[in-house]
Amino acid sequence: SGVVAVPLLLGSTLGFLFVAYTTNFDFQIMYFTYCVVIFVSVMLVCYMAVEDCSNEWLRGSKLALRDLLRSFTVDRSNNPDFFWVLVARTIYYVGTSGEVFLLYYLRDMVGTSDEATQKFQISIIALLGQSAAAVVACPAGYLSERSGRKILVYLACSLMCFTWAMLIIMPYIWTEDASYESYVLCIYFCAVIYGIGNGAYLSVELALALDCLPDGRTAAKDLGIWSASAFIGSAIGPLIQAFSLELVGRRGIAIDHMDQPESYHYAGYLSVLAFSFVSLSVSALIISFIRRVR
């Protein structure tokens, strides 16, 4: 699981670097590059992956619509552990959705008004977080073989909750007399801590799912649902938090250096960050319901 997480994180890091160094290029060229990369990766998988022939399955009974719809479900009564893995993973990705609003946070809370500087700081945050996660993923995966999967999830969620808590209290710690540079450096420090937590989680999430699979014969179907849980959480989280930021942030408590008309108040960011904090905490709590693995 840790080995699988490293290419994922390195790919994201290279993607950030590619975007950072191609900001002046035409979008058509960038999308063409994406298409080429995806095509090459798919061809490599099709060529290198070896699997059993499925001709025998095709000779069986026809696939009914009821069977297709059933493939989207998990029987909680027969497979409670895998069900809790799905729920916890969905809520985890709901909690990580607070990352989407960091650009606004830099503008309104930190006071970075220049758009180019905002993009630069976001790129540094992303690179620090992804790099820290890539460094941690393999050792954390190896550690989970000895200490267990769940303790790594608890540690990961605790570190990420610490990051959200820091972002909540920092506007009160850094007043007008404090150095702007020190504020930004503290944000970078939080990005590293967040990356370590994210790397620890990614190092065990696949292993945890494999340990709790209901049946090896339906592994592809069950892992498909497992993969969809991340997409569902990543879609729900920004919707809820964007609504919260817009609703609460326009009527919240103003901070002195927030003089831009398009800015959001501190109360809006408090609602977003607190929502992420609670979501990650609930995700860790749900993992404790799993009985098959330690």
Image: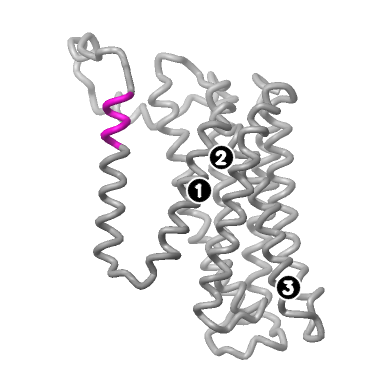
Residue 78's x, y, as percent?
A: 53, 19
Q: Which mark is residue 203?
A: none
Q: Residue at x 26, y 50 (%)?
A: 35
Secondary structure of residue under mark 2:
helix
Bounds of the magenta segment: 42-48
Left/right placement of residue 128 relative to residue 59 reads: right
Asked if the residues shown at circle 1 and circle 2 are in contact, with their CB atoms under 8 angstroms apart, the answer is yes
For disc 1, the neighbor class at 10 Å (few under 14, some 14 to 19, many from 20) is many
Name the N-terminal-most of marks 1 and 2: 2
Residue at horizontal 24 percent and vertical 64 percent from the top: 28
For the residues labelled 3 and 2, the Cα–Cα distance comes to 32 Å
Magenta region, main secondary structure: helix
- Percent of width and height locating residue 39: 26, 42
Res 136 quadrant in image: top right
- The image shows residue 279, relative to residue 51, as above or below, that is below
For the C terminus, the quadrant is top right
Is 146 left or right of 262, judged from the image as shown? right
| SS at badge 3 | helix
Let me know if residue 45 is in the magenta part.
Answer: yes
In the rendered image, which residue does mark 2 sit on? 89
Q: Earlier in the sequence, mark 3 or mark 2?
A: 2
* Amino acid type indicated by mark 1: Gly
Query: Which badge, 1 or 3, is on the more N-terminal residue?
Result: 3
Dot in front, 3 or 2? 3
Q: Residue at x 66, y 27 (%)?
A: 142
Q: Secondary structure at mark 1?
A: helix
The residue that mark 1 highlights is: 233
Q: Tell me the residue at 77%/80% (across/down).
A: 179
Q: Which residue is mark 3?
A: 183
Determine crowd level at label 3: few under 14, some 14-19, many 20+ residues with C-alpha closer than 10 A: some
Q: Is residue 288 above or below residue 98?
A: above
Kindly report the distance in space between the C-alpha atoms of the residues bearing marks 1 and 3: 30 Å
